[in-house]
Image (cartoon, grey):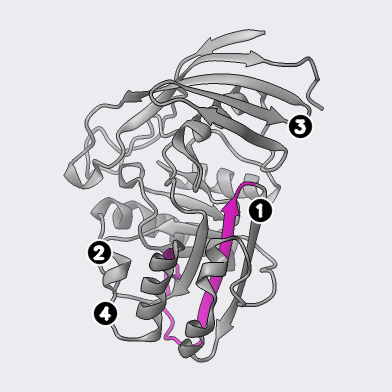
Amino acid sequence: MKIGRGVHLTRGKGCGHCPGSHTGERPCLATATVKAGAWLLLEHPGPWPERVTDLAGPGPVAEAVRAAKKAGVRPQLIRRAGRRRATPPLQVYAAFSRGDEVWIEGRELADPAELAALDLRALAEGRSPGLGDPAPEPVLLVCAHGRRNACCARTGGPLARSLAARFERLIWETTHVGGDRFAANLVCLPHALSYGDLGETEAVAAVDAYLRGEVVLDRLRGRAGTPEPAQAAEHFVRLHTGYLGVDGLRVESVTGTSRYEAVVAVRQSRYRVIVEPVQQPDPCGTGCAENQRTYVVRELTLLNEAALV
């Protein structure tokens, strides 16, 4: 069996600030940030600088942010949607989302100085930094980083508040997660599933799906920490097979430089996928101009006859 297919398009409402952008009409597949495989989330009510590594210091949180960046861990500042409590206590999460190793742990610190004891190099390698027991629930991040991009505050802030009214403690506002031109953006940890161009309806559908162990392909940007061609191959295999489980699908290999060949396993079935990057139209403005590439599938071939179950 062999198929060819174009990009998967989605539709929605614009934000009113950037005509023709943030509408859901641009394909957002394979745009999740590729470098984020280990995460350190630090509660900080604000203000947030344009770049988290410029957080005013010295101080335990600022030092932890810079230490995480140096260790190869992605630092994110977080705060409760709609309310900004004084800290301490300081909520901290550590998460790892590469390959089949997916976990998250967290606890409140009475003294922010305890951050200095975290083993961030261990976290970068997929081991516990010594933060505590596994978190009992996922952590859902909505980018509301207005200092980095006005569209994120304009769309992300209201979305975070509306989601918090429904999902309560699972929702946090956060700093830049990449893909400003897809605001409002959502990241579901620990799997690091990234969604963009979200309104409330699409965001609720994405969260509901994640809580039952599935993805929604509409507005799915990909899995952070995974190369873009692998994100694209996974997307097109899911689109073709209808398989939506967060587990049970694995990109076994990706080769190529401008035309990529991937092998994707879905339970007992394996697929060969060929994808190519293409340039997207101009963004709404220079602040939303990052990563204007998307992918098309050129070939998708079933390598064996095992049926999906």
Quadrant (top left/top right/bottom left/bottom right) for the N terminus: top right
CA gap, disc 1 to disc 2?
31 Å
Residue at point 59% right, 31% down? Answer: 253
Question: Residue 101 shows which numbered tag?
Answer: 1
**191 relative to 281, above or below:** below
Q: Which residue is mark 4?
A: 56
Separation (CA) of disc 4 from disc 1: 33 Å
Q: In terms of sequence position, does the residue under pointer 1 or pointer 2 come before the other?
A: 2
Q: Can you tell which mark lies on residue 50?
A: 2
In the image, the segment drawn in magenta is: 74-99
Horizontally, residue 149 falls left or right of residue 105, namely: left
Residue 178 visible in this rendered orientation of the protein: yes
> The disc labelled 1 sits on which kind of residue?
Glu
Mark 3 or mark 2, which is nearer the start of the sequence? 2
- Relative to the observer, which residue lies in front, 254 or 141? 254
Q: Which circle marks residue 91 in the picture?
A: none
244 lies left or right of 139: right
- Residue nearest the observer in this picture, 10 or 260: 260
Residue position marked by numbered label 3 in the rendering? 267
Of badges 3 and 1, nearer the viewer stands 1
Residue at image point 66% right, 53% down: 101
Per the model, the C-alpha gap separating discs 3 and 1 is 17 Å
Q: Three-letter amino acid code at disc 2?
A: Glu
Place of residue 126 in the rendered image (x, y in percent of width and height, measured from the top left): 60, 61
